[in-house]
Image: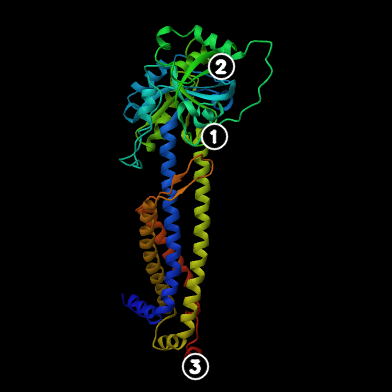
Amino acid sequence: MMLFKIALRNILRNGRRSLMTASAIAVGAVALTLFGEYNDFVFLGLETQTVMQTGHLAVYKQGYFDFGSGNPAGYSISRYEKVMETIKTDPVLKPMLRVVTPTVNLFGIAGNFSINASKTFFGTGFVPADRERMRHWDPYHLITADYHFPPLGISDADINRGVIGVGMARVLGLCGPLKVKNCPAQPVEKPKEAASVPASSVDFAELAARDVPAAEKSGTTDMPRLDLLSATASGAPNVVSFYVTGAQNQGVKELDDMFVGMNLKLAQELLYGRGEHKAVSLILQLNRTQDMSAVKARLAQIFAEQKLDLEVHDFTETAAGYTQIKSFLTVLFVFLAVIMGVIVIFTVINTMSMSVMERTQEIGTARAMGVRRSGIRVQFLIEGLLLGAFGATAGLILGSALAVWFNHANIMYTPPGRAQAVAIRLLVNDFPLLVRIWISLVIIATIGSLVPANRASRMKVVDALRHV
């Protein structure tokens, strides 16, 4: 305790220099706190958003993950209802499961032949009630109480209704009927000469109308309609009518320009025709992300025991963007931490070296009075430790206050790969992160004082006493 009192007095004796050194350490603590809390919020937000959309785990037929994206019909799961029942009733899995639901992914051509416009689309068919429950998964309490989820736009009652991306609405000329804001008007094309063959729109509309029961047509005539064309599992072309209830921004422009969300039954009708209706994947959403490895292992065990040709992938494999963004931000944080560490260590070395030079006679006197070399070394190390502790503490307090201000400033920005701006949010009071930053800066400051402390401890007593 006496050494700490002496070290504190020495720090206060050169107050201005000590203040500048502690300020440099505090600046490093502020930068690491703000960027670290931003990173942690982004990581949790990415995880929440990904799990809302794709669940924790996805069950595919073996080979789909590597080769099936171009042929979803050929890699579909037969009798998927039985597989779902097996998963839901397993006594090990049941307490950890939140939602188990089938999905169908497919590609095709969407046409709005009232204006002779068409575009390739990526369609996702899902059970609306299950999707509604999935998007309320929020174990980290990131969604504020006043947040209102936009309407899903798809219901279990009417399988012909669905939503499209804003980019898809723009390309197919549906911004006006769907009342999409900030949507530029389509350029007017020059009139073409009349063709000798009938327009393809007439053919698609007639084909789609033949298979639609009269009861399903009622109540949808006032909605914009698209004709969706795709190939069935046998390779035959198939077409269905799709009534658009709204346009929703998908976040990523490439997906926004080609997204079609539809009822699972309509997607099955389009992809499998009159054949067996299968599922491309089974989505599992868990109560906690921490159970993901245990559920994945149990599913692999069940599939092996029942000889099912199925495989399981978690969201870090199916959502490549999650892993890439997390790795990118982690590298940035490490890079920033290294820069701050170098600045702190050189600042402490400079301050402690100046202190050793000014106190040379004092060191010689202490050595003449019997203080060992190790005592001198420990004395300067404690001074470096205290400088680090004062600077890091002040930096964490200031950084936490700035984090609260950032959350209330509502500063908007557009992240890479996003189609819309989002507000900057930080994970305030991330105590594990704050503890790691404080300990790291104190250790770095102590290490920075090691070189001057060693030089002070190696001084000869006579030379130190004669120093002027």
Rounded to the nearest whole Å, what is the CA distance between mark 3 and mark 2? Answer: 95 Å
Residue type at the position of mark 1: Pro
Residue type at the position of mark 2: Leu
Residue 191, picture quadrant: top right
Mark 1 secondary-structure assignment: loop
Residue wearing tag 1: 184
> Marks 1 and 3: CB-CB under 8 Å?
no
Residue wearing tag 2: 229
Q: Does the image show residue 440?
A: no
Q: Residues within 10 Å of mark 1 (few under 14, many from 20)?
A: few
Question: Which of 113/212 is in front?
Answer: 113
Residue depicted at x 47% and y 43%: 421
Residue depicted at x 47% and y 68%: 447
Q: Is residue 317 above or below residue 70?
A: below
User: Nearer the observer, disc 1 or disc 2?
Assistant: 1
Residue wearing tag 3: 466
Q: Is residue 235 above or below residue 366?
A: above
Residue 365, picture quadrant: bottom left
Rounded to the nearest whole Å, what is the CA distance between mark 1 and mark 3? Answer: 84 Å
Q: How many marks?
A: 3
Residue 80, image x, y percentages: 44, 17
Mark 3 secondary-structure assignment: helix
Q: Does the image show residue 332?
A: yes
